[in-house]
Amino acid sequence: MFGSTKIGIIGTGNIAGIMADTIKSMRGVSVYAVGSRTPENASRFATLYGVKKSYGSYEELVNDPKVELIYVATPHSEHFENVKLALNAGKNVICEKAFMLNKRQAEEVFKLAEEKNLLLTEAIWTRYMPMRAKLNEILASNVIGEPTMLTANLGYSIANKDRIARPELGGGALLDLGVYVLNFASMVFGDDVTDIMSICTFNEFGMDMNDSITLRYRDGRMAVLNATARGVADRSGVIYGSKGYIQVDNINNIEAITVYDNERKKIGSYKAPRQISGYEYEIQSCLKAISENWIECPEMPHSESLKMLDMMDFIRKTNGIVFPGEGEPAPEVYETTSAHVEDAYSLDASTVIENNNAETES
């Protein structure tokens, strides 16, 4: 590809604005067009962020022949149709987390992307950031010995936002915040999960507002994860090892990593590099993937998006969280060897700046 890659944004909420501002400071890429459900919203966004073209429908945006990559920044409930629209128009796509409402939707759009030989990836920014590689490097050094357990917490006071509160928008803390703690555990411990135990509290619409999740891995490691839409959390992650532990400051956009020995003495400290917003890394990955004719980004391959959705499907099923239009089949439930747990989770072997302001248009 030559010149500047032109991006079109579906959605005009705060997160779309953060992305537009970020791309302004990047080379080799520009936000060329924005699409909204109304011309007024699109025009307002285009004026505010210096976007050349504005469209009063998503259809017009994806059919602009100059747009090469679509960024989907709408509520969870809209991702499935928005992504299909863009792919059917021949566009590469990066879609905000949570990628889809459920695994079945993700399987369908990944199949479509494969058929059309187009890039489709999930914009879970923590997967693309350089501090992820730094954390992997520290763990590989064996400085804390064998990692055996981790905890991670993420919470914001956002329960009153429609996109969190309402089932028709794919609401709840799990898809918006729990997705980050689950991804943190996956990046550290992998995906060989044998059991999931979870408990939630709910709002008046049946959407989860507080989630406590425990994962057990085949090798005996455990992850204890908490996400809340009703309060501010420390956003910390701690990885416990046989010779010490690692403290991660802000799992949603790692600011620092500190290493302690078995006497709780600090033996290492690493600060995050300067960044524009943190969103630049996922766009850089997309540009490379498009230039190489890849249909997925290596930082977040399709298989990982499917695994995260598989787990969230199971958590929602066991807690009775259902979105409009959803039905069976649900994820498989297996008997566990533990006498204290009725249901166990099994992965299908085939298979955020605060990212809490996706567009909700009326």
Image: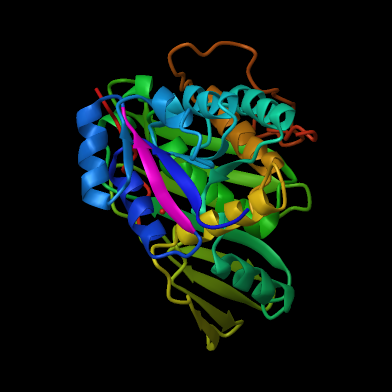
- Say which of 3 and 35 sits in front: 3
Rendered view: 3 above or below 327: below
Residue extent of the magenta highlight? 29-36
Can you tell which quarter of the image residue 242 is in?
bottom right
Residue displayed at 40% across by 26% down: 60
Judge whether residue 225 can be spotted in this image: no
Judged by its main secondary structure, the magenta piece is strand
Residue at coordinates 46% horizontally, 22% vertically from top-left? 321
Indicate left or right for 43 with 235 as reference.
left
Residue 335: percent from left, percent from top = 74, 27
Q: Position of residue 338 (x, y in %)?
A: 72, 37
Is-magenta flag for residue 335?
A: no
Tell me residue 346's x, y (percent).
73, 33
Residue in the image at 54% along x and 51% along y: 224
Q: Is residue 209 above or below residue 181?
A: above
Pick the residue in front: 239 or 286. Answer: 286
Vertical arrangement, residue 145 with respect to residue 45, above or below: below
